[in-house]
Structures are given as C-alpha cells and as structure tokens.
Image (cartoon, rainbow, N blue to C red):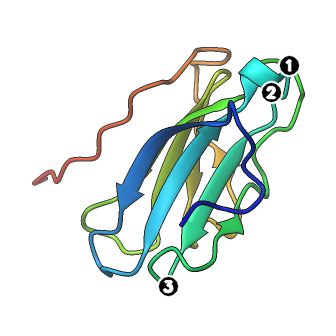
C-alpha cells in the first residue's frame, strides 16, 4: 500500500526492505516536481498497511533538501542512513530521530547510499 498522503508526482526514489523483519520497509519520497523540497521518509512495520513519516531532525530548510535515498544498515538493527540534496543523515533509533553525518562534506547531493559489512 502507498502512504495515504502521497499525491501524483510524488516520486518514490527508493524502497528499502528491512534486513531484519519481512513486514518492515522504508521509502524515500521526492516531491520537488511539486515545488515541495521538504524531506519525506516513511517507515512501515506491518507490511505496508500503515506508514509513518520519520523526518525528525532532517533539516527542513525548504531549499533543495528533497530526500533521495534511505538505507538500513545490514548488520545493526535500527541504524538508518538517508541522503538528501544537501547532505547525509543517520538515525540510531529506526528513524525516530535523525542527525547530520556531514563531517566536511556540507552541501553535497547524495543520491546513492550503499551499506556494506566490513571487517575491522
């Protein structure tokens, strides 16, 4: 099912199924074609029957901060990343709150995000 607030021209850029739960998924929605540059990330934990907007902490800004991608870490449950027109954000609580992960890369566009497992 589609989140009820999505209108025509709302582009779902990424559907990220959960690595941990078959009923969970995340979607990144881009609405810049509607002159709406706010970030939109949705989460479901019931197979798509209901969707929750999870953008707390992602800069609204209104200036080209449309969301391009959302990814779930394949190893750490609840760890999410998203890329916007203005930077990268990370959530440690399944999208409950986001914080910037820019470091020295302010203002860059992130349209692709890949999570891999690494051995240190």
Mark 3 and mark 1 residues within 8 Å of each other at the beta carbon: no
Please, is residue 30 above or below residue 70 in the view?
above
Q: Which residue is mark 1?
A: 63
Which residue is found at the position 56% from the left and 80% from the top? 49
Q: Is residue 38 left or right of residue 90?
A: right
Which residue is found at the position 54% from the left and 73% from the top? 44
Mark 1: give few (<14), some (14-19) or many (20+) Cα within 10 Å: few
Residue 72 seen: no
Q: Nearer the viewer, mark 2 or mark 3?
A: 3
Disc ID at residue 28? none
Which residue is found at the position 57% from the left and 17% from the top? 109
Q: Quadrant of residue 4?
A: bottom right
Secondary element type, mark 3: loop
Between the C-alphas of marks 2 and 3, the distance is 28 Å
Of 23 and 86, the residue lying toward us: 23
Secondary element type, mark 1: loop
Between the C-alphas of marks 3 and 1, the distance is 33 Å
Q: Which residue is mark 2?
A: 37
Rendering coords of residue 50 (x, y %): 63, 77
Q: Is residue 107 left or right of residue 81?
A: right
Which residue is found at the position 47% from the left and 24% from the top? 111
Please, is residue 41 above or below residue 48 in the view?
above
Q: Nearer the viewer, mark 2 or mark 1?
A: 2
Q: Is residue 31 left or right of residue 68?
A: right
Q: Which residue is mark 3?
A: 46
Sequence order check, earlier mark of 3 and 1 = 3
Mark 2: give few (<14), some (14-19) or many (20+) Cα within 10 Å: many
Secondary element type, mark 2: loop
Mark 2 and mark 1 residues within 8 Å of each other at the beta carbon: yes
Rendering coords of residue 114 (x, y %): 30, 38
Between the C-alphas of marks 2 and 1, the distance is 6 Å
Rendering coords of residue 68 (x, y %): 55, 31
């Amino acid at each position: 099912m589609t989140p009820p607030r999505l209108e025509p021209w709302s582009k779902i850029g990424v559907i990220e199924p959960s690595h941990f739960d078959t009923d969970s998924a995340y979607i990144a929605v881009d609405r810049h074609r509607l002159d709406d540059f706010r970030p939109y990330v949705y989460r479901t934990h019931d197979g798509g029957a209901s969707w929750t907007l999870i953008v707390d902490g992602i800069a609204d800004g209104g200036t080209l901060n449309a969301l391009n991608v959302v990814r779930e870490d394949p190893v750490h449950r609840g760890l999410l990343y998203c890329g916007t027109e203005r930077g990268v954000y990370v959530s440690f609580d399944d999208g409950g709150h986001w914080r910037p992960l820019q470091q020295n890369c302010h203002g860059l566009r992130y349209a692709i995000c890949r999570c891999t497992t690494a051995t240190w």
